[in-house]
Image (tube, rainbow, N blue to C red):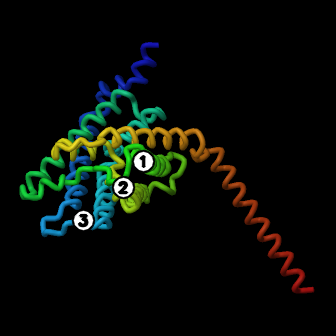
Amino acid sequence: MAGKLRETLGINEITSKKTSIWKTLIAEFVGNLLLNFFGCASCVSVIGIPIPDLVLIALTFGFTIFIVVQALGHVSGAHINPAITVGMMVTQNTSIIKGILYIIVQCLGALAGSGILRAATPEKFHAAGLGVTKLTDPVTPAQGLLIEFMLGFVLVLVVFGVCDPNRHEAKPAGALAIGIAVAVGHLATVDYTGSSMNPARSFGSAVVANIWDDHWVYWIGPILGGIAAGLLYKYVFTAPSTGPLKIIERYTAVVTDEKELKRLDGSKHDINLS
């Protein structure tokens, strides 16, 4: 019983000498730092343009996630988002303690990224919020919650799809697919809620700008969406096993099809001769 509890909580994983939890935590920190610096920088204009380019914002966030997942995915899984981490926790893909540590360093990384952005931005542009996520009037908190739920849902659904161990063909394009999901979310809804998708990203901006209006929306929405998507994928959409038996079945089916094609081709040839 004690051993199972330690495994569920992830104590063995944290204390094991074979795995470096610190390396994974640093990766999550750096990933969120880059996201909040580059992503939120796209929301700031220092050349006097009052309305930021929504396409620029969407592509910057999407491309940043793409490069972070590509660079750090092998280290920590590149969650870079508490909604993804919680989705992984409820489906037992990430242990409880590790998940909690991930969320803490994700928030700290986002805070560091927004802090660096604030230091690098002339003070007269700070009033715009440095990328803080806010509900656009007349969007209500309930509507914002629904938007952020859908954003968390689509992102975590894509993450689970490309990380499915039985879908080997999805792995090469995994980072790109996740980045596109982020870009699509921003293109569709950035003028509703700021398209957070990521509680840590919103937290870092909120701390630096000291703007907390409806901040709970950006935690509850994406996390509930992530939980729903994770459970749906695990219990409904998981790809069938590609173990040895399945490989044999697939090979046998291919060989049978080839024999059938040769037989049909031979029959057709005999008919032409006659």
Mark carried by residue 143: 1
Picture coordinates of residue 9 (x, y %)?
A: 39, 23
Sequence-wise first label, 3 or 2: 3
Give the labeled residue for mark 3.
Answer: 52
Asked if disc 3 and disc 2 are in contact, CB closer than 8 Å, the reply is no
Picture coordinates of residue 26 (x, y %)?
A: 23, 40
120 sits left or right of 143 in the view: left
| Circle 2: element type | helix
Q: Quadrant of residue 225?
A: top left
Sequence-wise first label, 3 or 1: 3
What amino acid type is highlighted by mark number 3?
Pro
Q: Nearer the viewer, mark 3 or mark 1?
A: 1
> Which residue in the rendered view is the most extreme toward the right?
274
Mark carried by residue 268: none
Picture coordinates of residue 155 (x, y %)?
A: 43, 50
What amino acid type is highlighted by mark number 1?
Gln
| Circle 3: element type | loop
Give the labeled residue for mark 2.
Answer: 192
What amino acid type is highlighted by mark number 2?
Tyr
Sequence-wise first label, 1 or 2: 1
Q: Nearer the viewer, mark 3 or mark 2?
A: 2
Q: Residue at x 50, y 40 (%)?
A: 228
Does the image show residue 139? yes
| Circle 1: element type | helix
How many numbered callouts? 3
Asked if disc 1 and disc 2 are in contact, CB closer than 8 Å, the reply is yes
